[in-house]
Image (cartoon, coloured by chain):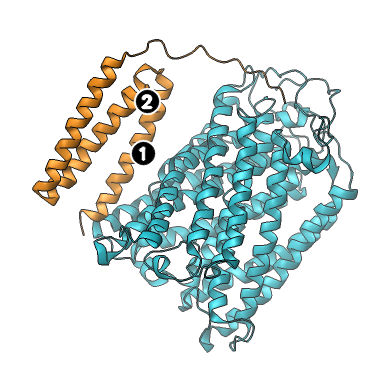
Chain colours: A orange, B cyan
Amino acid sequence: MSVSIEHPAEAHTEHPGYAIFIKVWLVLLVLTGCLVGMSHVSQTYAVWGLLTLTPLKAGLVFYFFMHLKYEGPLFKVVVLVTLGTLLIFFALLFSDVAFH
Amino acid sequence: MTTHASTAQPSYLVDTGTRKGLLAWLTTTDHKRIALLYLYAMSMFFLIAMGIGFVMRLVQLTSFQKLITAQTYNALFTVHGVIMIFLFVIPGLSAVFGNFFLPILIGAKDVSFPRLNLASWYFFMAGAILAVLSLFTGGGAPDTGWSFYAPFSLKTGTNVSLAVFAAFVLGFSSMLTGINFITTIHRMRAPGMQWFRMPLFCWAVYSTAWIQILATPIVAITLVLVILERFFGIGVFDPAKGGDPLLYQHLFWIYSHPAVYIMILPAMGAITEIIPTFAKRTIFGYKAIAFSSMAIAGVGSLVWAHHMFTSGMSGMALMLFSLLTMVVAVPSAVKVFNWVGTLYKGSIDFQPPLLFALTFIFLFCIGGLTGVMQGALAVNVHIHDTYFIVGHFHYVMFGGTGMAFFAALLYWFPKMWGKMYSKKAIYASWFPIFIGFNMLYFGMLILGLMGMPRRYYVHLPQFHTMHVVATVGSWFLVLGLLMFFGTLLYAILKGEKAEDNPWGGVTLEWTIPSPPPLENFETIPIVTHGPYEFGAQEGKS
């Protein structure tokens, strides 16, 4: 079936060079090292590391490697809604786990 | 809305491409044909699961249980739940009527991703086939109940792994459909079709689609963890390895409670289309209904742990989830109030779709109010895992979604097939359905309050009278459903030709021929006003 759809102008307006990818990759390596180090200190550190550094790492991947930085506001809002939902799920889950 | 001349294009039911017959249907990317593919498959699954439910009631008719073994009974209630939930009510109105009418209602020629739409149906069928295969392969039909609770689902020798994988595949179908509908609504509305000019069914489908894409991945990952646990013993849900079975319950219900709203929101949307048409009045509180759909989707995603009030979770979580459960009743009540407000002083035309829509409101209210009862912690402790729960969710799922499905089918039937059914036969089928339904499920509510636990193969003598009442009710119900489906099947094959607009509806689907042409509109309509403006018809009684 032929459906005519007007495609919006390409949202990507700028493209990053390899230098930025390598810098982000190095930051990710450092953060991973921190996580591994914290997991050897104690379980509490490991949990807090996972809860803080892992989302930061995921954010960097979203922002640079998955090009969120170069997308329009609609995509950013959609991703924020999704992450916000996830955060609420976590908070409610912790209302059980943290008060056991 | 702006109307336009009827088109010269052939009906979507006529093969116009190079492929003919079954092959043309199996390779179609037309949203209307895909909707019918869903409908035919789902109707078959519904009848199978209904038959299983019928057998389960027969088992309870006698306290001697000579019909089947206890293990078979466990398998039957699992399979009944899996089929009804995953293959009928979750895809339900969204896959059938959403697919068929969403593009038409917003003035589009198709959904945004037609090929992805067909892929969704194939995922649905693949999941269904895997679910059926799980009954006859490995260790036999799963015996865990449809919720696959750990740790039992990790230990049982039955074929849980394949059944869980089937649900995983079905989840893809649901997510892809959700993505398709959201994109369609955002990108393909006709000129002038502003957000608040969309028919409210579109708002309901839109809210549902957001739940589908936000919540389904969670259960998908959870089900993969169950498979990994069974094959590799990774220990996420196994307390012996530091895991937590309660975590499974949380993750399962984070999806599966919002799934209840995936089931009911499109149903509410369909009812919201039917009531103004047969009251010949504009809808009472358009924006309140639109926002209540979004509120149900939002708040409904935060109440999952009310399924776990007796699981031993923390007091803080108990209070929080009890409060949130009460809150979600508010937007649901807004809808009921607005439906009744629309009917008030309307010019009521008591046609079969309205009869089933009113049945929906009545039964859904019983389901909703018994739900609020369970939201209260002290009450919940006493009725948890009893027949009260079974009665409650059948009132919501069957009395709600099921009746709305029937109402929507009756409402849009002339448009979908271009044929009209026998109204007398439908009225006749309503009586056994309504009487049987209430005997069966109100009987279960009473049984639950008396203390009858759910999923038990046998029962104590004090419960027997109500079990007999419920079982006899199931016979009436099945009789009515067979009359209902038989009437519609006969109408598809030999029904009289229907008019383009038999009900006097004013939304866009009633401006095009019945059945609709392949691309719905010869020219895309220009929308100039809201969806429920009846003009001179309004207020006449």
Q: Position of residue B347 (x, y in %)?
A: 73, 40
Left of B292 or right of it: where is B222?
Answer: left
What secondary structure is marked by label 1? Answer: helix
Residue that mark 1 sits on: A85
Q: Quadrant of residue B430?
A: bottom right
Residue that mark 2 sits on: A66
Which residue is rendered at x = 40% and y = 62% of the image? B230
Asked whether the residues under the numbered discs 2 and 1 touch, taking CB atoms below 8 Å apart as contact, a structural biologist would say no
Left of B233 or right of it: where is B391?
Answer: right
Which residue is rendered at x = 48% and y = 60% of the image? B161
Which residue is rendered at x = 80% and y = 56% of the image? B426
The chain letter under disc 2 is A
- Of the pair A29 and B156, the residue shown nearer to us: A29
Q: Is residue B255 visible?
A: yes
Quarter of the image containing the C terminus of chain B? top right
Above or below, B66 relative to B42 = below
Callout 2 amino acid: Met
Q: CA distance from mark 2 to mark 1?
A: 20 Å
Q: Of callouts 2 and 1, which one flags the residue occurring earlier in the amino acid sequence?
A: 2
Left of B357 or right of it: where is B3?
Answer: right
